[in-house]
Image: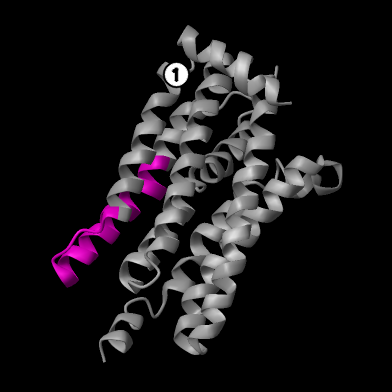
Amino acid sequence: MDKKLKIKVFPKAHLWLLIPFVLTIAGFYLSYWSKFSEAPWRQHMHGLSATAWYILVILQPWLIHNKPPIYHKKLGIIGIFLAGAVVFSAAQVMPHQVVNEFLPDVLKYGFSFADLCALAGFSICVIVGVWSARNINVHARWLISTVFWILLPATARLVFFPMLNIYDGNPPITYLQTVYICFVLTTLLPLLYMIFLDYKRENKVYKSYLFTLSGITFYTLAIAPMGKWPWWIDICHNIIGKGM
């Protein structure tokens, strides 16, 4: 009885998860999907593995409600390798951002720090989620949290890049300001709402959402100062940049 009750917690999670998936695909359309044939292998590895991870996170709650648990477990094993591919491929892409001469330094170095934080947060959510597989409530929330770590870069692109075209390269707000706005709309408010729903329904706040909200808030606010600090710039060039 207890197991059946727990499984009914997220009957429509797969539908809600389609929203960040569509936003992410749309956000990376101009920088990746529209240039698919021209992209280097490292971008293909990262783009395709991240897309596959998103699809897996969407499929898993549907499977647990509509198919025998064995399918959910088998796909979960595949998911471990997919998560590893996301992390490995991201590590191949990041050094090229450090040496990108087209980005202002505050963005180049600041976003390198944000990317590392997002990669670490994503990895922790996957590891703890797998470790908590016996507790479906905890397990599901840790894995749902993974989508937020890779959502903000996509939504910022989705808003800012069209503005560049509309305003002939001089949009009314900067890219960093766009990141702050998208953080509030696509990360802060949704996570606070999810925390509220859990507390209202169960009188409980789950650590996964608190961890994700705290981590993304931290790296979002750290982009500007980290982009200017000499010690971090040195790390970017001496360690990250040499990963090419």
User: Looking at the image, which residue is at 69% across and 49% down?
Assistant: 47
Q: Which residues are magenta?
A: 183-207
Residue in the foreground of this view, choosing between 38 and 230 = 230
Inspect the image, locate mark 1, and give the three-letter code of the amino acid beneath it. Met
Mark 1 neighbour density, 10 Å: few (under 14) some (14–19) many (20 or more): many
- The residue indicated by pointer 1 is 226
> Which colouring convention does the figure follow?
one colour
Residue 217 x %, y %? 34, 37
The vertical placement of 153 against 146, above or below, is above
Residue 183 x %, y %? 40, 41
User: Looking at the image, which residue is at 55% across and 10% down?
Assistant: 234
What kind of element bears circle 1?
helix
Residue 230 x %, y %? 49, 7
State yes or no: residue 52 in magenta. no
Residue 23 x %, y %? 55, 54
State yes or no: residue 188 in magenta. yes
